[in-house]
Image (cartoon, coloured by chain):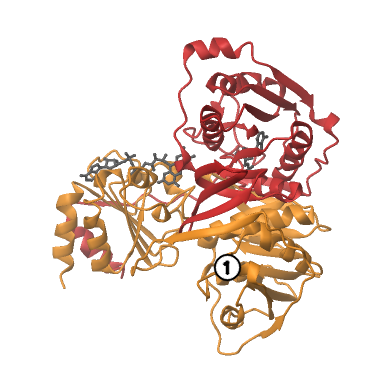
Amino acid sequence: MTKILVIAEHLDGKLNGATARAVSAAVATTPESIDVIVLSDAPEAIAAEAAKIEGVSKVLTVARAENAHGLAAVLAPQIAKAAAGYSHVFAPSTTFGKDLAPRVAALLGVSQVSDVMSVEGSHTFKRPIYAGNAIVTVEVDAASTVVATIRTASWPAAASTNSSASVEALTLDVTLPSHTRFVDLQQGKSDRPDLQGAAKVVSGGRGVGSKENFEIIYKFADKIGAGVGASRAAVDAGYCPNEMQVGQTGKIIAPELYMAIGISGAIQHLTGIKDAGTIVAINKDGEAPIFEIADIGLVGDLFKILPELEAAIGQ
Amino acid sequence: MKILVGYKRVVDYNVRIQVKPDGSGVVTDGVKLSANPFDDIALEEALRLREKGLAEEVVIVGIGPADLTAHLRNGLAMGANRAIHVQTTDAVSPLAAARTFLKLIEKEQPSLVILGKQAIDDDANQTGQMLAALWDRPQATFASKVEIAGGKVTVTREVDAGLETIEAELPAVITTDLRLNEPRFIKLPDIMKAKSKPIDVIELGSLGVEVADHIKTTHYAAPPKRSKGVMVKDAAELVAALKQKGLL
Ligand SMILES: Cc1cc2nc3c(=O)[nH]c(=O)nc-3n(C[C@H](O)[C@H](O)[C@H](O)COP(=O)(O)OP(=O)(O)OC[C@H]3O[C@@H](n4cnc5c(N)ncnc54)[C@H](O)[C@@H]3O)c2cc1C
Ligand SMILES: Nc1ncnc2c1ncn2[C@@H]1O[C@H](COP(=O)(O)O)[C@@H](O)[C@H]1O
């Protein structure tokens, strides 16, 4: 019997959109039921959001003060306990899920399937290796619990419905460790669309040249209502903060439109944008590898082209 | 204190991996192999802690076939005190690797274990978290800053929302992100010195680690190719093309 437990990701009392994407992968597994578990110090509002996701049978809440900051060492033993009776445990392949799910898997004594791109059967999945340069099919032994992280860029968010699944409070008798403590979270404050959910993303690379110059990227992105990303080289050079990095070791995204500006197109960067609808590249070097995968390419100096684009788009 | 460092050998990150036509694997014959980039960063961090006087000994660990020796010598040349080579010809899953590290921990009693956040061959991103679970100790993954004082480690982590700082009691497991440091280059005299540094060889079979994996890889395929696009000559053409696609 296939019963899936999806771990909800949330921050500041709000459900993260990645959760609904993990639910989509759960739906594709055609289980008897899909339950979402919310661990928080105050799970009610988050649970109410999760209960609206189409396909969800039930939402379980675990309210404990220790759950306020999503520390893997604190959450994992609770999830491992709650996982009894489930055939599958899914988490989104975000930094939250990547940190937590392997710890749960190890407590359950099983290996994990990382970054599920497609579901081929209840125990058969496809996932990328070598920075996405090969796709493997993996089969999990039918007798063991499937613990998997879901590659969010491969899955649409399950729709939100008007009806609500039931919400049930869970009391788990688990002693929690105190050896790990949250200190703080420095969040990038931005009014721009979230990189992982944005329909359009404009990214700048080393070619942008400086933190000051990066303003030209922000300005253009705002003009077309896009989220802003960056290559690793741009982040390393301090042009912009780490949470903007797109690629193998940054965020994997699938916007309808991706514009790579002054980015050469290293494989590690391309891994992050393979699922984008339309890729546009602007680079002064006509030989840059980004042009091999771009749907639309324009050779030229970004400092000249971006203002021209703004003018051509008009009001 | 003693620091144990994961030092995996992988296909070099510059190699363009090819899938075998029969789908049985990827081509690794004659392909350049290097240290996993995240493990070079792990080793560098351990060496810096030793240089600051916060650690006495840095021990690198490689789990893999007999010809791993040259790779481990590189880590010794970079500055590790000694190496442990856990020999096996089988593929080792992250869970089996974590179980192997746990056995070594029981013997070595390190205060800190630093692994890469992911091996760039399997891209699993699991071993450190699994080890921390089995060891029942703190984990600080995706580290971009590490500070040790008073039996505690304070780690800044690169997370989707920004930078998170956590504090953990030692012993603990840390996994490295790219911006933690820039690994040093190996100097020629150090290669000579490394020749006399010890490498302990242990048969994986002798550790009593459960290695059977309940996940099997049944097929390898090349990723779907994106078809080659068009070039436009100026900003006006680009805007027209995007408008036509309904993207502007
Ligand atoms: C283990 C590992 C993981 C990695 N993970 C990631 C990752 O997640 N994301 C990532 O992005 N990278 C990653 N990298 C790094 C990657 O290999 C490249 O080094 C990086 O993507 C290069 O960034 P870039 O294209 O901005 O810089 P460069 O390669 O230096 O390219 C800059 C480009 O800008 C162009 N340019 C310069 N000036 C102008 C101008 N005025 N107008 C127009 N064009 C201009 C140049 O022609 C050039 O093509 C990783 C590397 C390793 C080893
Ligand atoms: N065979 C191995 N030998 C040495 N270290 C390993 C091995 N497998 C995994 N590790 C460590 O675990 C990290 C994460 O690997 P993975 O979970 O496979 O992505 C690597 O960066 C290494 O530090």
Find residue B46 and report its horizontal and vertical position in percent: 56, 32
Find residue A218 and report its horizontal and vertical position in percent: 26, 60
- Residue B39: quadrant of the picture: top right
Q: Nearer the viewer, residue A54 or A122?
A: A54
Which part of the image, by quadrant, shows the N terminus of chain A? bottom right
Q: Is residue A268 left or right of residue A180?
A: left
The residue that label 1 is drawn on is A9
Is A94 located above or below residue B5 in the figure? below
Residue B32 shows in the view? yes
Q: Nearer the viewer, residue A129 or B234?
A: A129
Tell me the quadrant of ligand 2.
Answer: top right
Asked whether mark 1 and ligand 1 are closer than 8 Å, the reply comes as: no
- Number of other residues with Cα within 10 Å of mark 1, as a class: few under 14, some 14 to 19, many 20 or more: many
Q: Chain of mark 1?
A: A
Is A117 located above or below residue A21 in the figure? above
Is B88 located above or below residue A246 in the figure? above
- Residue A178: quadrant of the picture: bottom right
Residue at coordinates 29% horizontally, 52% vertically from top-left? B230
Could you say which chain is coloured orange in the image? Answer: A
Residue at coordinates 76% horizontally, 41% vertically from top-left? B99
Q: Amino acid at mark 1?
A: Glu
Find residue B164 and report its horizontal and vertical position in percent: 50, 56
